[in-house]
Each structure stands twice: as C-alpha cells, then as structure tokens.
Amino acid sequence: MAGHNKWSKIKRKKAVNDAKRGAQFTKIIREITVAAREGGGNPDFNPRLRLAVDTAKAASMPAENIDRAIKKGTGELEGVTYEEISYEGYGPGGVALYIECLTDNVNRSVADVRHRLGKFDGSLGTSGSVAWQFDRKGQIIVDATRFSEEAVFEAAIEAGAEDVSQEGGEFTITTEVTDFAAVQDALKAAGIESSSAELTMIAKNEVEVAGKDAEKLLKLLDALEELDDVQNVHSNADIDEAVLAEAM
C-alpha cells in the first residue's frame, strides 16, 4: 500500500473516532463554500461541489449546514472569502510534503505551517520544490469485505479507472482527475458504495521512513492536519508498519 494510503487510512479512522468533529466540519464547510464560489451552487454541474457535499453527508453534516455553506459560496448569504494556497516542504527523513490550505489570512497560515514544521524537524520549501514529485489523481476506497473484486474491478475499469488494488480489506481505485466522477457514477450504478473518495496528490516515488523519524513524521502530519486552514497534507513517505500500528 502506498505511503499516502497509509496516512489516509489513519485519517479516516480518526475522522470516525475523533471527538473534535467540529474541526472536520470546519474544513468541509470551507471546501463547499469555495467549490460553490468557483463552479456554481448546483452539484450536478459542479464536480468539485458534488464531491464536497458527498464528503459532508458521509461525515453526517446536517443538511442546513451544507445549504448555508453553498449559499455563502454563491453570494446568497454573506460569508468569509477563502483563498486557496499550497505550501511545499520537507519532514523528518527528508520526505516531501505538499500542504493544501483554504484560508482567509495567508500570513497566519504560513506562520502556522512553518511553526508546525519546525517543531517536528521539518522545513518550509520554495514553490515548486516538491510538487513535481506528485501526480494529481482521483482515489476511491471501497470495503473489500462487502463487495467482490470482480464487481469492483469491472465497474471501475470499464468507466476509465487507471488501477484497482486490494490490501488490508480495502480496494483502492485510482483515476485520472477527468475520469473521477464517471468512475464514481459507475460504482454507484453497480450498487457499490465507497468508503471515501477524494482528489488527492499521489507520490511518484516513495521514501522509506522508520524509527524516530517515522514517529516524528506522524506527529508532524497530525499537527498540520489539526490546523483549521489546512485541508490536506500529502507525503511521499512509506511509513514503517510497526510505527503505523501504534498510531492506529
């Protein structure tokens, strides 16, 4: 399983078990608002908004919260204007980090990100320093205990998915960004529910991280994810299984 998938699995578990659900809602609401601002308030004609709304529903966000966020994005209600910005840097063990933010205060965001990086032996890089090490892809997770390999593979590949892999009781479906929505639709049409779906950055090559570096890296990733302005953190780390087991 790719390093990004390992961290994503931990994040998904924490999203279910974490008492700080409000922090998760804050990130989703920001994404809905920006998606509606950029592409309009109808999820049927705005793939980014559709994905954000699906994520909100999966997190059990009340419908009125979703509607209010959309209206703030379209200007029907007054709201904060968020700016999309990404930061690139390095973590323990020399791993590459690509950090995506939605913020109403860029100075605050960069200061917070730099502080968290420095606290856990990381550093902020220049624009373009690590982005080339990642590809933007769609990634869909399906519970392998509920759906057969044949059904998932057939629905996904026929709809244009790049790859379907299985490990740890999960199918991971990878797509080009342009095929992401079509693959989601094909899975739904086949009666296959996804555990999660996202547009993400997948590392072209991974860096093995173990021991103290792996422990520090997980703490750093967690600390960055805790920041309200940070939407996603992507890493090219292949994290040691023993350290991951403790984190889970």
Image (spheres, grey):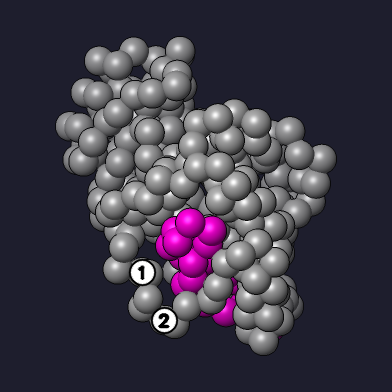
Give the residue type that dot 1 points to.
Ala
Question: Are the residues tagged 2 and 1 within 8 Å (C-beta)?
Answer: yes
Circle 2: element type? loop
Q: Quadrant of the C terminus?
A: top right
Q: Which residues are magenta?
A: 82-105
Give the residue type that dot 2 points to.
Ser
* Quarter of image, res 66: bottom right
* Quarter of image, res 30: bottom right
* Quarter of image, res 243: top right
Alpha carbon of mark 2 to alpha carbon of mark 1: how far?
8 Å
Residue lying furthest bottom: 107
Q: In this figure, which residue is indicated by the disc labeled 2?
A: 127
Residue 68 falls within the magenta-colored stretch: no
Mark 2 neighbour density, 10 Å: few (under 14) some (14–19) many (20 or more): few
On the question of residue 230 being in view, the answer is no
Q: Position of residue 100 (x, y in %)?
A: 52, 67
Task: Pick whichever, 241 or 72, lies toward us.
Answer: 241
Task: Pick whichever, 214 or 39, lies toward us.
Answer: 214
Q: Quadrant of the N terminus?
A: top left
Q: In this figure, which residue is indicated by the disc labeled 1?
A: 131
* Magenta span dominant secondary structure: strand
